[in-house]
Amino acid sequence: MAAFQDPSNPLFLHHSDGAGLVLISQPLSHNNYSTWSRAMLVALTVKNKVGFVDGSLPKPPPTDATYLAWSRANSMVISWLFNSVSKEILNSILLATTAEEIWEDLRVRFSKNNGPHIFQLRRQLVCTQQGTDSVSTYYTKMKCIKEELESYRRQEFQCTCGVFQQFQNQTDIEYLMCFLMGLNESFSNIRGQILLSEPLPSIGKVFSMLLQQEEAQREIIPPSSYAPSSHSKKLVVSVNR
């Protein structure tokens, strides 16, 4: 069987692998390289095409039996990269001949200049408040900020050694503290219980506890009870007069 006919071979192209395919929903812009590259690597892994961007599947010589199949698959990956970047960025990569060349170019241009964006993310993590949001909505907002920050940290640490794990544990605690600080005061009692726990529970456990507390508050204080009574309305009117 030829390489391009074997579904397990990176040179294989499925009938659904068209040039117009969009692998991820969020195109690359000037401030989202970290999350974009992570999403693209996941999508390319599913397609078994990571080798075309990370250099592990180099271009064979023209005399090689796989040359045509490689060129065809490489062009397909290039088209997917074209479809995943903003129009402004697209114009700067149109003349590239390999997917690896495009990937490296984008990495060099956008992965280094992330200091200001990390600053903004950390500010958001500290300053975000629950406000009128439900616990679920607030948790989702904070989790999105945390995951984007972690994607930058993964770039800094190229190992899974004990030092990295210690650092990750510390950042998880910091994230939990930020999450608890932004909660409304109606959760002050359960927040105090959580902070007194030894060891501190995971953010997932805390989220579950808060959902139960929120549901209990709804049962005790129905929404209709927040509406001012007719007596209070009369008092307001009399004062205004």
Image (cartoon, grey):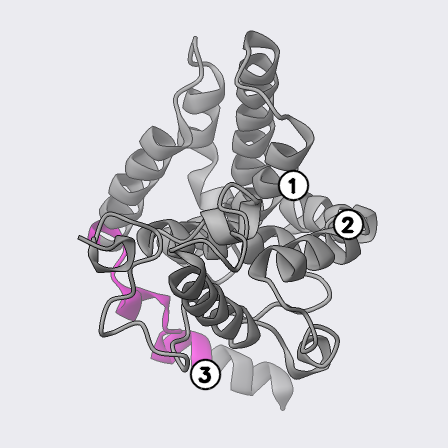
Q: Which mark is residue 234?
A: 3
Picture layout, residue 179 above or below residue 111: above
- Amino acid type at circle 2 is Asn
Mark 1 or mark 3, which is nearer the start of the sequence? 1
- Residue at left 53%, top 39%? 179
In the rendering, which numbered label is found on residue 152? 1
Cα gap from disc 3 to disc 2, whole angstroms: 57 Å
Q: Position of residue 4 (x, y in %)?
A: 28, 59
Q: Label 3 sits on what residue type?
A: Lys
Q: Earlier in the sequence, mark 3 or mark 2?
A: 2
Q: Is residue 98 visible?
A: yes
Q: Quadrant of residue 72?
A: bottom left
Q: Are marks 1 and 2 in contact (CB under 8 Å)?
A: yes
Read off the magenta span. 219-233
Given residues 56 and 2, the one toward you in this image is: 2
Cα–Cα gap, marks 3 and 1: 57 Å
Distance between the Cα atoms at labels 1 and 2? 8 Å
Q: Position of residue 177 (x, y in %)?
A: 57, 30
Residue 225 part of the magenta-drawn span: yes
Using residue 216 as the reference point, say whether residue 128 is left or right of it.
right
* Residue at mark 2: 114
Identified by mark 1, the residue type is Tyr
> Image quadrant for the C terminus?
bottom right
Answer with the quarter of the image where residue 103 lies. Answer: bottom right
- Give the mark nearer the N terminus: 1 vs 2: 2
Q: Nearer the viewer, mark 3 or mark 1?
A: 1
Left or right relative to 196: residue 7: left
The one of 174 and 165 positioned closer to us in this rendering: 165
